[in-house]
Image (tube, grey):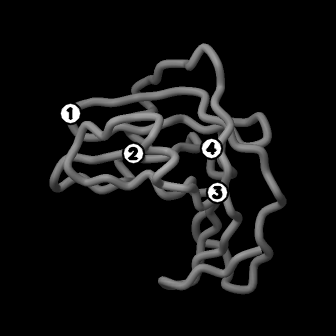
Amino acid sequence: MAYTRYLTNKKKVLELITPLHTNVFASHVTHEFGVPNNSSLPLEAELKIVGYAYDKKAQAFVVSVNGSIYRPDNHIYHLTISTADGVKPVYSNLLLESGWIHLFSPIPIQAILTLLIGNKNVRA
């Protein structure tokens, strides 16, 4: 099984925010988990940072993809910025369920569509 994601420019994302925690990610927005290895890549998309959340365990941006903040599995599209030691990036899902702050002006971000099979990216 594989998953599809939008790779971001980590350096540019980190120009927007200072990580609060030790482990810094800021590298991708997951589209869908558990897709077959022969899946096609998602269609091109317009991504915008529309919100923000943080707590003592993690920090993440909320991202809209083609105007929606919800992934196919109904989790919120997000970009994990950082996590505390011992906290995995998937924790961002719980963080965002607790609420998040809407940005006044959405921030467009560039991303490359990929399919991840094992540790190998397959690009569009």
Nearer the observer, disc 3 or disc 4?
3
C-alpha separation, residue under disc 3 versus residue under disc 4: 11 Å
Q: Secondary structure at mark 3?
A: strand
Return the x and y of residue 115 as percentages of the image width and height.
65, 74
- Mark 2 in CB contact with mark 3 (< 8 angstroms): no
Q: How many marks?
A: 4
Mark 2 or mark 3, earlier in chain: 3
According to the image, label 1 marks what residue? 56
Mark 2 or mark 1, earlier in chain: 1
Mark 3 or mark 1, earlier in chain: 3
Mark 4 or mark 2, earlier in chain: 4
Residue 81 has which mark? 2
Look at label 4 and name its amino acid: Asn
Nearer the observer, disc 4 or disc 1?
1
Q: Quick one: quadrant of the N terminus?
A: bottom right
According to the image, label 3 marks what residue? 31
Residue 74 has which mark? 4
C-alpha separation, residue under disc 4 versus residue under disc 2: 21 Å
Return the x and y of residue 21 as percentages of the image width and height.
22, 43
Look at label 3 and name its amino acid: His
Q: Residues within 10 Å of mark 2 (few under 14, many from 20)?
A: many
Look at label 2 and name its amino acid: Ile
The residue closer to the viewer here, 101 or 105, is 105
C-alpha separation, residue under disc 4 versus residue under disc 1: 25 Å
Q: Secondary structure at mark 4?
A: loop
